[in-house]
Image (tube, rainbow, N blue to C red):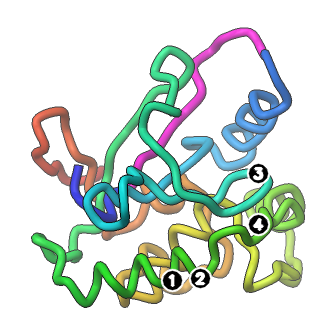
Amino acid sequence: MRPLDLIMTTRKEKPINDPLDVASIIITAITGGPSHVRLCIKGLYENWDFWEVTYPKCRFGKMEEVDYKEYDVEIGRHRNLPFPLPREIAEKAVGEMKRVEGRLYDVGELFFSQLFDTIGLDHTDHSDPERFVCSSGVEYILTCLGFPFCPLDFLVSPEDLIKSEFYTKVEEGGESIEST
C-alpha cells in the first residue's frame, strides 16, 4: 500500500456480534458498496497505519485492528495522486488529519442525508462541515490536497468513491487496475 491509498472493507456474512456489525450491514444496504473506508498513512505519521472516521470519532489506527475473517478488504487509490508522495502533500494531509482527530462521527449524515441521497429524495444537506462519516472524511482530506474523488458531491459514500472516474483498484501485487 502507498500513502493515501483507500482501505475499503465490506463485512462478510457472519453472525452479528455487536452494534457495529449492525451499522456495517446498514451502511452496505444503504450505499450498495463497502461499509467502511480508511486512508493509509503508513510511513507518514508516527507508527500509525491508517486514519479513519469511525464511531464515535476520527482517529488513527493500526492494520492489526482489521479482522480479515470478518471483512473483505479492497485497496484503491486516486489515479492522479503522485507517487512517491511529495513531502508538502504528505505534511498537509497529516496536518489536516491531526486537526480533525477526535471530531465526532456524523450519525445524522449517515442515517438521514446518505439514505435520502441514495433513494433520490430531494433534501437539504444539514451535515456539520466539521463532522464526517468515513467516506466524507476521506473525501474531505483528499479535497484539501486538491485530489477529490467526487468534486461535485456534498455527500459521498464508499461506493461513490469506487465509482469515481479517479478510483483505481490495487490488485494483490501492488499493480493498479482500471476501475470498471
* First to last magenta residue range: 6-16
State if disc 4 and disc 2 touch (CB < 8 Å): no
Q: Position of residue 117 (x, y in %)?
A: 76, 66
* Residue for badge 2: 99
* Residue for badge 3: 55
- Can you tell which of label 4 and label 3 is closer to the viewer? 3
Query: Of helix, strand and loop, which one carries label 2?
Result: helix
Query: Of helix, strand and loop, which one carries label 3?
Result: loop
* Residue for badge 1: 96
Check residue 8 for magenta coloring. yes
Q: Local crowd at mark 3 within 10 Å, few (<14), some, or many (≥20)?
A: some
Classify 152 as above or below 116.
below
State if disc 2 and disc 3 touch (CB < 8 Å): no
Which badge, 2 or 4, comes first in the chain's sequence? Answer: 2
Mark 3 and mark 2: span between their CA atoms?
17 Å
Which quadrant of the view contains residue 125? bottom right
| Camera-nearest residue between 175 and 159 | 175
- Can you tell which of label 3 and label 2 is closer to the viewer? 2
